[in-house]
Amino acid sequence: MCADVVTAEKRSRMMATIRGKDTAVELAVRRQLHALGYRFRLHRGDLSGRPDIVLPRFRVAVFVHGCFWHRHRGCGYAATPKTRADFWQAKFEANVRRDALAVESLARAGWRVAILWECAIGPDGLEAANLARFRAWLEGQAAAPATSLLEIP
């Protein structure tokens, strides 16, 4: 087992500052969507998984996932800590399981779901290509039939 480079108290303070909503990437996406004329609701508790952004007009729920916490496959941000690996593995598995159940529940209720990964979002929101892809899917203009799930990237 590898020792942590900071004290337990400092690590606790650091972990306490991690936000569950209104993160920088979420705010960037919200600003971008609003500037494009989309209107939405935030963190609707009546929907499974409490989506970060809900576009009722399109019946779309958007989750802005952090790559570390939600285990974005193949992403460098999704590294597993070396200390207490069993604890982290169980936590990550529970997060992924909960995410899958939320998406499944929303799809059964007739909602389309978009998952926007942290690594695809810059300080100004989604990059142009990803934004175009999201808008085409949102508006139902995607070349392929609109599916109930869109992941970017």
Image (tube, grey):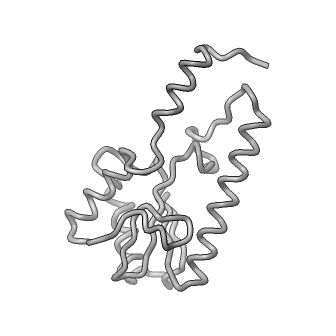
Residue for point 62% across, 61% down: 99
Nearer to us in this view, 44 or 143: 44
Left or right: 47 with respect to 99?
left
Side (left or right) of 34 relative to 135: left
**Label tally:** 0
Q: Percent x, y for residue 138?
A: 38, 76
What is the x, y in percent for residue 33? 28, 64
Specify whether 83 is left or right of 38: right
Query: What residue is at 36 percent from the left and 44 percent from the top?
Result: 24
Residue 74: x percent and y percent? 63, 47
Examine the rendered structure and indicate whether residue 38 appears above or below residue 7: below
Q: Measured along the vertical axis of the image, is residue 93 above or below residue 98?
A: above
The residue nearer to you, when weighing 22 against 78, is 22
What residue is rendered at 34% in x and 72% in y? 135
Residue 101, given in percent of the width and then of the height, sits at 66, 68
Which residue appears at 61% of the width and 14% of the height?
5
**Image quarter in which the N terminus is found:** top right
Q: Nearer the viewer, residue 12 or 37?
A: 12
User: Which of the 4 image quarters holds residue 107?
Assistant: bottom right
In the visual, does 20 lie left or right of 140? right
Does residue 90 lie above or below 1 as drawn?
below
